[in-house]
Structures are given as C-alpha cells and as structure tokens.
Image: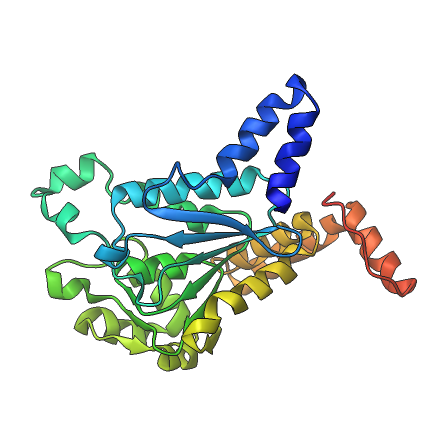
Amino acid sequence: MAQLGRILKLANRGSNSYSSLQSLARLYSTAQYENIKVEKKGDKQNVLLIQLNRPKALNALCNSLMSELTKALQEAEADKDIGAVVLTGSERAFAAGADIKEMQTMNTFSDVYNSDFLKGWEAVARCRKPVIAAVNGYSLGGGCELAMMCDIIYAGEKAQFGQPEITLGTIPGAGGTQRLTRAVGKSKAMEMVLTGNRISAQEAEKAGLVSKVFPPDQVVGEALKTAEKIASFSKTIVAMCKEAVNTGYELTLAEAIHFEKRLFHATFATNDRKEGMTAFVEKRSPNFKDS
C-alpha cells in the first residue's frame, strides 16, 4: 500500500513527474521478470527482497536468471530508499547450482572463453549496498558461490552447502575455490571442492561460512530484520563500512588498517557523522540524511 501511495502521489503532481512514476512502476513490478520476484519490505519500505524463482529447476542459475538478478540489483542501487537487499530462494532450494543443461551445450574452450562465460555473475559481489543471503535447502555449486558473494549468510536448519563441480568433471568457476577458502580455511575448502561433499547448515556455521542458523520458516524473516536495522543507518556510512571490510580483506593487515583509518577520517566530513554523535550526546535517535 505504501508503494501504491507513493505512485499515486507522483501521478497527482502532473506530467513533470511522469518519468519518476514510470521509474517507480518499473521497480515495483515483477512482471518484467520471469525467473525472480522482487518486493520492497519493511516498515519504511527500505529493504528489497529478491527471490529466485525457478522452482521446477531448483532455482538453477541460468543466464537469463542472472541477467534479471543483475538488473534488479542495479535498480536497488539506483533507489535512494533502499538500504539493504535480501536474496533468497525457496524452502527446498536457495539454488541447486548453475544450469547444467545450459552449460552442457558449450563443447569447447573457445565457446566459454570467447563468450567470457560467468562474466555477469559478479553483480552481487559488486553491489555497494549490503546483501544478505537467506538460504534454505540446497546451496550447491553456483548456488553456494552466489551465497558467498553476499555480505551475510543466514541459513535454515536443513540447508546444505557444497561445491560438487568435481563430480561433473570441472571446477568451481564463480569464486568457489577462492571465497570458500577465505571463509572456512584451506583444509575444509580443499575437502569440499576435491570430494564434492556437502556440509550442513550447522557445520557451515561452525566453519564460519554462515552467520546464524534458524528454523526454515524463520530465515527470511530474520534476514529482513537484520536488513531493516542496517537500512536504518546512514546509507553513506554503511557503504563506507562495507568498503572497508571488503577492501581490507584482500590487503595486508598494515595496509588494511591504514585504509580503514582513512575512511574513518573521511566520515568526519559527512553530515551523518555529525548528526550521529550529536544525537548521542543529546540522548535522542539520530535523523540520518545519507549525506
């Protein structure tokens, strides 16, 4: 209803707001998508929920689905109201992997190399706004890689994670051998990618791949709660904090601390830093303006 209200307000402002009305309508409509569903969530409508929606294929990640996901994330980036994104699948599968039938038709090295196969899969990792994966069921192969591109992973108690590419005569190609190693360590990652064995949600949490585990029917709700909390803070400062973590993760400790300190110093040039500290001193809730 809140979404509809905003659209109607724009419509009442006349033709000058027509382009804005069209933009809102495109964002709120799921009719443009065949393989995903998108919906604004939260009391302030500041969280975008993206649901992978290929139930018959257990949300296998085909090219068209990944293109739609990229488009939805680009729209979320452009929407000033959105402060965080939750990415989920179904209770049966977050994503069972890349679409094997689609890949099976690629018969030569030149087919995949010249097409730069998987090039468009990095949209989640590149998103400047925080992305939380709410994982139920299978999160295998490309599905596990997609979850690892997110900033936080919440899992249902029956979720399963794995990189079974070795059983298909290939290796992970969207970060599986790299992000998994950084998340769970070399030995555990080697065991998973060399055997194709799956791990449970509980094992994934113990290994550090997953932040928290919940009953299956609560995962999305808990992810939305966390996303709403993140979205309540300054979007500018949240983006800077995310950049500090991601950039520092690939630097030496000394370089990372230096980078962090420079971003910390930079926050003092923002209005939201001033507002946050002033609100604390005045014992009131801050009113961040994302500036």
Tell me residue 142's x, y (percent).
Answer: 28, 57
One can see residue 69 in this view: yes
Name, please, the residue furthest toward the top: 15
264 lies left or right of 99:
right
Tell me residue 263's x, y (percent).
Answer: 67, 52
101 lies left or right of 280:
left
Vertical order, 211 against 85 (above or below): below
One can see residue 187 in this view: no
203 lies left or right of 6:
left
**Residue at left 79%, top 53%?**
273
**Residue at left 19%, top 39%?**
113
Residue nearer the viewer, 144 or 232: 232
Indicate the quadrant where residue 225 lies. bottom right
Residue nearer the viewer, 51 or 70: 51
Q: How many labels does the image show?
A: 0
Name, please, the residue furthest toward the left: 107
Tell me residue 223's x, y (percent).
Answer: 52, 65
**Residue at left 64%, top 17%?**
15
59 lies left or right of 24:
left
Vertical order, 221 against 118 (above or below): below
Tell me residue 110's x, y (percent).
Answer: 13, 37
**Colouring used for the render:** rainbow
Vertical order, 105 against 136 (above or below): above
Q: In which quadrant is the C terminus drawn? A: top right
Vertical order, 35 against 6 (above or below): below
Name, please, the residue furthest toward the right: 282
